[in-house]
Image (tube, grey):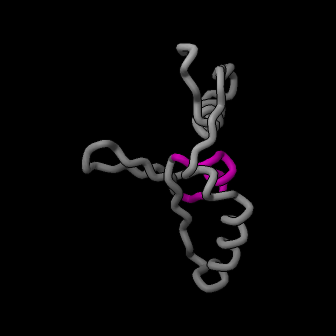
Amino acid sequence: MSSNSAAVHFMAETAKIVNPSRLVCCRIFRGCQLADSAPAEDLRARIAELKKQYPDLAVVSYVNTTAAVKGLSDIIWHLRERAESRAVAA
């Protein structure tokens, strides 16, 4: 990485999850407005509330979320630059 490079914290978390035996190195961790706008504690409470009304509720989260939010999700969604999209079961 160049000296001007920075990594978003959720990317480093995800890299460590999929490569637990590897060292993840980043010079600077920056926040992500999207990830920061969805705290896991708030999501956990909302899921509990919605599951009372919708017991079969599936939680879908965008890939730009924290590891904690991904852990509460049934599906992680990733949009490509083109019109295609891809969902991955958590």
**57 or 9, nearer to the observer:** 9
Q: Quadrant of residue 52?
A: bottom right
Q: Residue furthest left?
A: 83
Above or below, 6 relative to 67: above
The residue shown at (72%, 71%) is 45
The residue shown at (65%, 31%) is 29
The residue shown at (70%, 65%) is 42
Q: Residue furthest top?
A: 2
Q: Position of residue 31 (x, y in %)?
A: 63, 41
Q: Quadrant of residue 69?
A: bottom right
**46 or 53, nearer to the observer:** 46
Label total for image: 0
Q: Position of residue 46 (x, y in %)?
A: 66, 72
**35 or 69, nearer to the observer:** 35
Q: Position of residue 64 (x, y in %)?
A: 53, 47
Q: Position of residue 76 (x, y in %)?
A: 51, 52
Above or below, 2 relative to 42: above
Q: Residue furthest bottom?
A: 53
The residue shown at (58%, 29%) is 7
Residue 39 among those drawn in magenta:
no
- Of the 4 image quadrants, the one containing the N terminus is top right
Horizontal side of 67 relative to 83 (left or right) equals: right
Horizontal side of 71 relative to 83 (left or right) equals: right
Q: What's the magenta region?
A: 64-74
